[in-house]
Amino acid sequence: MGAWGVLAFDNDDANDWAYDLEGADDLALVESAFDTIEQTDDYLEAPDASNALAACEVLARLNGKSGYKNSYTEKVDEWVAAHPQTPSPALLKRADAAIDRILGENSELKELWADSDENGAWLASVEDLRQRLRK
């Protein structure tokens, strides 16, 4: 896992996803990240989970709840500022369901963090993100 911290953008997969966001004019990339999670019935791969958490961060930031900002979120924060909009309740519900799936059974990302000394900090960061998605 190419991760250096517990926050949603503290890994290679989420940062690659954020570069794709720069070319988007709408929330199609966010929806696509959730589509992938929803269409995975068996084992959820870590890159797909990381992308979905990044998508959740976009929605939280669109709702004015960035929680944190650093050099890894800069491109996302710029995109959010350039594309102001309010995420639909349905999209926020999909985000919450994606977090449930990531924290559930058969999730590679959850398993990778479970084997880490920073598992508690990662779980706390994901729960913080979930709270920032709620109004």
Image (cartoon, grey):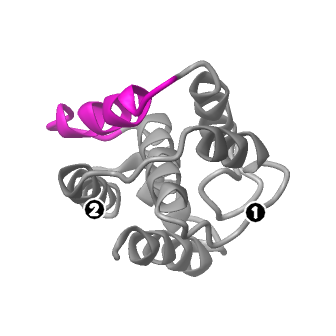
Foreground pick, 42 / 92: 92
Depth check, mark 1 against mark 2: the one in front is: 1
Taking the image as shown, residue 41 lies to the left or right of residue 4, namely: left
Q: Is residue 125 above or below residue 13?
A: below
Residue at position x 50%, y 36% in the image: 47
Q: CA distance from mark 1 to mark 2?
A: 21 Å
Using a 10 Å C-alpha cutoff, classify the residue at mark 1 as few (fewer than 14 neighbours), some (14 to 19) or many (20 or more). Answer: few
Looking at the picture, how far across and down is residue 32, in whole percent?
Answer: 33, 28
Q: Which residue is mark 2?
A: 96
Q: For the residue carrying disc 2, how many other residues have a C-alpha within 10 Å: few (<14), some (14-19), or many (20+)? A: some
Reply yes or no: does residue 54 show up in magenta: no
Secondary structure state at the residue bearing disc 1? loop
Residue at 53% x, 22% y is 24
Q: Could you say where residue 17 lies in the image, as x and y percent from the top left?
A: 58, 30
Where residue 106 appears, x then y in whole percent? 27, 50
Q: Which residue is mark 1?
A: 69
Question: Where residue 51 sits: x, y (%)?
Answer: 48, 39
Magenta stretch: give its range. 25-44
Picture quadrant of residue 13: top right
Q: Quadrant of the N terminus?
A: top right
Can you say whether 104 is above or below 82 in the image?
below
Residue 26 highlighted magenta (yes or no): yes
43 left or right of 48 in image: left
Q: Amino acid at mark 1?
A: Lys
Q: Which element carries disc 2, helix, strand or loop?
A: helix
Residue type at mark 2 is: Asp
In the rendered structure, the answer to whether residue 37 lies left or right of residue 70 reads: left
**Residue at figure coordinates x 41%, y 47% from the top left:** 108
